[in-house]
Amino acid sequence: MILALDQGTSSTKALLVDADGAVRGTAARPLSQSHPGPGRVEQDPEELWASVAGAAADLLAAHPGADIAGVALSTQRESVLAWEAATGEPLSPLLSWQDRRGAAHCAQLAAGDEARKITARTGLPVDPMFSATKAAALLDELDPGRRACRSGRIRVGTVDAWLLRRVTGRDVTELGNASRTQLLDLGTGTYSPYLLDLFGVPRAALPEPTASTGPFGSADGLPGVRAGTPLAAVLADSHAALFAHSAGRTGVVKATYGSGSSVMALAPDAAEGLPAGLARTVAWQLPGERPALALEANIAASGTAVRWAAQLLGTDERTLAALAEGAGDSAAVLVPAFEGLGAPYWDRQAVAVLTGFTQAAPRAGLARAAIESVAFQIAETVALFDRALGPAPALHADGGASANTTLMQLQADLCARPVRVGAHPESSALGAAHLAGLNLGLWTAKELRLRADEATAATTVNPRRDAGWRRERLTHWRDAVRRSRLART
Ligand SMILES: Nc1ncnc2c1ncn2[C@@H]1O[C@H](COP(=O)(O)OP(=O)(O)OP(=O)(O)O)[C@@H](O)[C@H]1O
Ligand SMILES: [Mg+2]
């Protein structure tokens, strides 16, 4: 079996996947976040590690006979921390991908001619979500002269790199994760000296980028795993979900409904330039192959908006989902721009707004508006993919909020195409397991393609509404987005 771990923003999930690709067991450990100031979102590296080790231990304890052939890892992206090279002890909190402390730095870069050059090299818009400005902020505090970095005493890395350090003892990072730092040159697959200099991050502080199948070494640091068990695959979470849906084939557009959302499709041809509103990323690198490129739209708050509304109503997501299911189309609109807006607007000054409320049924109205906010945001970015790649026949869905049937129906209605919901919402862990099994020879690429077809055909949600309804609802949403952007912080 493969032990697959998915380290996400709100929890760490663990899956046990057998040699036929079936999920034989699951475990999860929650993970907290802190908000120490405006625009600041942090997590505790030790709590994060404990959630990974704990989820793995829980799962292995529940399946004492499990023979683990390899470990697979998928991780939240862009979040960044520093640790001591000699000991692996954290020197900072984890600055979350949601953290906006790099906003002023980004604005300064955007005011000059740098933004265009940065995007041309990295495929990414200049935005505080990506690691670079956060890494710079961390180092300004820890090592203002960068001497400790240059002498190799400090490491700065993303969650994959931090976990790899704990699990394998090596300072390496997976290429897809590295491509989200805004320090990697997509053309060369290596850190760009221009960007390292621009952001003030010395090369010596960064872990070495490595293909998605490593070699990473063995997972000896993971409690309960036999010594010598290989760490067989590492993927960024959104990329891992795309791998689960597509088994590496082009033509699949998927949306991951986690704390944030990522809509993504493989798009190997980078010659045409970057389509408006989208970013380009390394999806993964398979053994002996060039890095596979993908187009992506990032939405900063999706499941987060649902959780926020549930908290406001003093309830949980499940009850909120039931409230929303009973309500009709909402007159109220929630634009959950808690940390500004991502794709297609990339406007970090936009603020969260709640518009159009009436006195009737406020609880159901808010619940419905929260669910609708997720579907609206995804629908707008799927339209960008239609323009860039031609309309995809279906949208593949995964992640925690994909279990919400009201949301999936709304999504099909707003995107005017079937939504295919995976058999397992944990597609990130599953995709990492699929790649690990391929690497270990448990299955072939052909078998994996059949498996992906079966898994993603689990539930198909067909659209029920017409074009007039869609136009009207999207106009309603865009009107609220306009207010959110006018209100600016
Ligand atoms: N029934 C539901 N309806 C809508 N949203 C839900 C439901 N259940 C959970 N969620 C939301 O899904 C999110 C958790 O999903 P998931 O576990 O996939 O996220 P994550 O992996 O922690 O985050 P990320 O992948 O963005 O790092 C939470 O924000 C939660 O509010
Ligand atoms: Mg996730």
Image: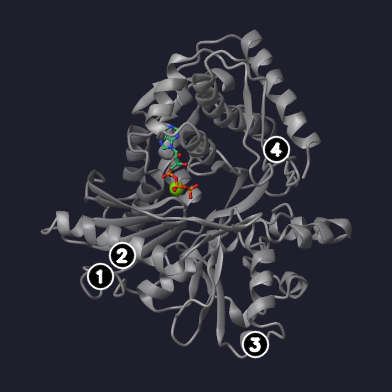
Name which residue lies at 64% across and 58% down: 130
| Amino acid on which the number 2 mark rests in the picture | Ala
Residue of label 3: 150
Looking at the picture, how far across and down is residue 350, in whole percent? 74, 41
- Is residue 215 something that shows in the picture? no
Q: Nearer the viewer, mark 3 or mark 2?
A: 2
| Amino acid on which the number 1 mark rests in the picture | Pro
Residue at disc 2, secondary structure:
helix
Q: Is residue 486 left or right of residue 472?
A: right
Image quarter of the N terminus:
bottom left
Q: Quadrant of ligand 1?
A: top left
Q: Residues within 10 Å of mark 4 (few under 14, many from 20)?
A: some
Mark 3 and mark 1 residues within 8 Å of each other at the beta carbon? no
- Is residue 229 something that shows in the picture? yes
Name which residue lies at 58% across and 22% down: 415
Report, in whole angstroms, how far the alpha carbon at label 1 lies from the one at label 4: 42 Å
Report, in whole angstroms, how far the alpha carbon at label 4 lies from the one at label 3: 38 Å
